[in-house]
Image (tube, rainbow, N blue to C red):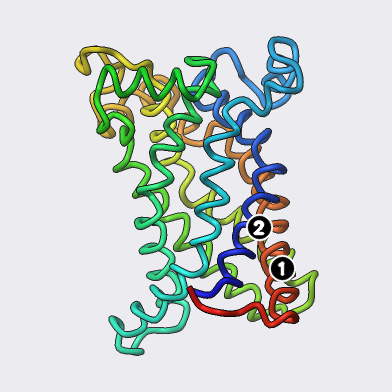
Amino acid sequence: MSRTDIYSGGIAGLASIVVGHPFDTIKIHLQTEPHKYKTTYKAIKIILKEHGVKGFFRGVLPPGIGQIIISSLFFGIYSKLLVLSRQLLNHKKSKLTSTYLAGQMTGIFLSFIISPLDLIKSKIQTGLYNTNKDCINSIVKNTGIKGLFSGFTSTCFREALRFGAYFSSYDYIRAKSGDSLYAIINAGGFAGAISWLVSYPIDVIKTKLQSLPVYPNPGNDQYKGIKDCVKQTYRAEGLNGFFKGVFVCCFRSYPVNAIFFLSYEVSKMIFKSYQFTSQI
């Protein structure tokens, strides 16, 4: 894993969290409180009225730190797993299949970091806790360390689908459009939107599960697991319930991922120009 990948990925992660977190806050509210936040416009108005502009950045610290760490590892891990996936497939499948498999494995690997950070972020964004410390202490006190991995299975499913679609669509679009800055922006933006569209129904389930209050007795939970959450969501909201907030999510994904890939590629070029490419 090169220093170029690590530092370029970290810069890209920082840029994307600054742009994307306000949209993510809106998405969380639309998914968890659909009766209060009926539309994107209404969600923006209510958040501004109740919390002001800073309300859009509630819970930004865990995903902010996590995004920088994850992005620093992101491309290095993916490149290693891409080599492995090509070996597993014996080069018999298309390059796109290898890319998709490597993306899925990357998503599963990173879920060990993403899941607890998403859990804390979801609980703070929905107003269950005011600080990261209070949130972590409450979870650990009531459910132990394992409680920080509540929703881990649904996170793995989401990340496998999302990163598989993410890398394969980015490579496909880049192959068709070239190496210009516009091509990077366009490929990154569409890859982000496509990856979220594919994985969104699972993201809804994950968010609902992770946004539940922490109880001393797990049996008091509103949902008994993924299957029960799917049933209750469909019963209460129909198929639309699995796509609540999808518009704001995909709308957010284009600029966030365009900036993510542009920051990564430009940083990488700058580091390489200074021959900052040693391995760690």
- Where is mark 1, residue-wise? 267
Image-based side of 154 in relation to 218, left or right = right
Point out residue 42 in the picture as x, y percentages from the top left corner: 70, 19
The image shows residue 35, relative to residue 271, as above or below, that is: above
Vertical comparison of 110 with 234: above or below: below
- Kindly identify which residue carries mark 2: 12
Q: Nearer the viewer, residue 38 or 140?
A: 140
Residue at the spot 79% in from the left edge and 71% down from the top edge: 181
The answer to whether marks 2 and 1 mark residues whose Cβ atoms lie closer than 8 Å is: yes
Which is nearer the eye, 85 or 274? 274
Question: In the visual, does 179 lie left or right of 168?
Answer: right
Horizontal arrangement in the rendering, residue 132 relative to residue 208 (left or right): right
Count up the numbered dots: 2
Please say if 70 is above or below 141.
Answer: below
> At 71% from the left edge and 68% from the top edge, which residue is drawn?
267
Residue placed most toward the observer, 79 or 200: 79
Disc on res. 237: none
Image coordinates for residue 103, horizontal then vertical, percent: 43, 65
Which residue is rendered at x = 46% and y = 22% of the image?
133
Residue at the bottom extreme of this rendering: 91
Task: Classify 10 Å Cα crowding around label 2: few (below 14), some (14-19), many (20 and above).
Answer: many
Q: Secondary structure at mark 2?
A: helix
Relative to 144, is 92 on the left or the right? right
Mark 2 / mark 1, whichever is N-terminal? 2
Question: Percent position (x, y) of residue 1?
Answer: 48, 74
Q: Position of residue 237 (x, y in %)?
A: 45, 23
In this orientation, which residue lies closer to the viewer: 115 or 35? 115
Q: Indicate the secondary structure of the residue bearing disc 1.
A: helix
Residue type marked 2: Ala
- Gap between marks 2 and 1, in whole Å? 8 Å
Kindly identify the amino acid type of the residue bearing the numbered disc 1: Ser
